[in-house]
Image: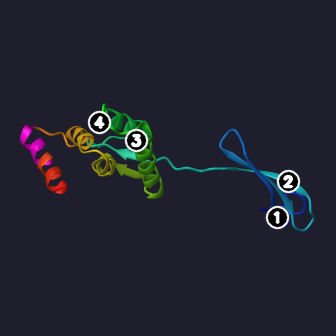
Amino acid sequence: MKCPNCGYDESKVVDSRPTENSSIRRRRECVKCLKRFTTYEIIDSIPVIVVKKDGHCEEFDRKKILSGLIKSCYKRPVSNEKMEDIVKEIEYEIQNSLKSKVTSSEIGTKVMKRLREIDAVSYVRFASVYREFKDVETFMEELKGIQQEKS
């Protein structure tokens, strides 16, 4: 960071604190002239775009994942904290993938993978909507797969 007083390239951070608008306020001191100055750092996030099955795009919304989890875990022994953890894990994974676009099927697969480990009934509920089971046979095949895994 260049000193606004003398233009020297090096400075040291004396104090850092967050501000109300998601930025960080830093007090710096120039190594050469010892003058102090303040800088503000803003976190730059690139929005992730979700490509839906029909091809249209929308911005990633964690609330949609949570809503789907709440519906599939209704009256099941899955805590709200666990559902929130799943959403956080998926959001973290997507943000750190450095991809600007992700498909809704990728997100659905991530949700199903985590639900399958936690609660089989919630998993089947979510999968029935996500995979759009057309008939009872498809539903039964999924259940048989779960039973074979448990055996």
Residue 4 sits in quarter? bottom right
Q: Nearer the viewer, residue 41 or 138?
A: 138
Q: Which residue lies under the disc numbered 4?
A: 72
Would residue 30 appear left or right of 150 to someone viewing this image? right
Horizontal and vertical percent for residue 144? 11, 49
Q: Determine the CA span between mark 2 and mark 1.
A: 10 Å
For mark 4, give the secondary structure.
Answer: helix
Where does residue 151 sit, x and y in percent of width and height? Answer: 15, 56
Mark 1 closeness class: few <14, some 14–19, many ≥20 residues within 10 Å:
many
52 or 148: nearer the eye? 148
Marks 3, 1: nearer the viewer: 3
Q: Are marks 3 and 1 in contact (CB under 8 Å)?
A: no
Of the two numbered discs 4 and 1 on the same chain, state the one appearing first in sequence.
1
Which numbered disc flags the more N-terminal residue, 4 or 3? 4
Residue that numbered label 1 is attached to: 11
Q: Which mark is residue 37?
A: 2
Q: Secondary structure at mark 3?
A: helix
User: Which of the two labelled residues, at mark 2 and mark 1, occupies the earlier sequence position?
Assistant: 1
Find residue 83 and name its label. Answer: 3
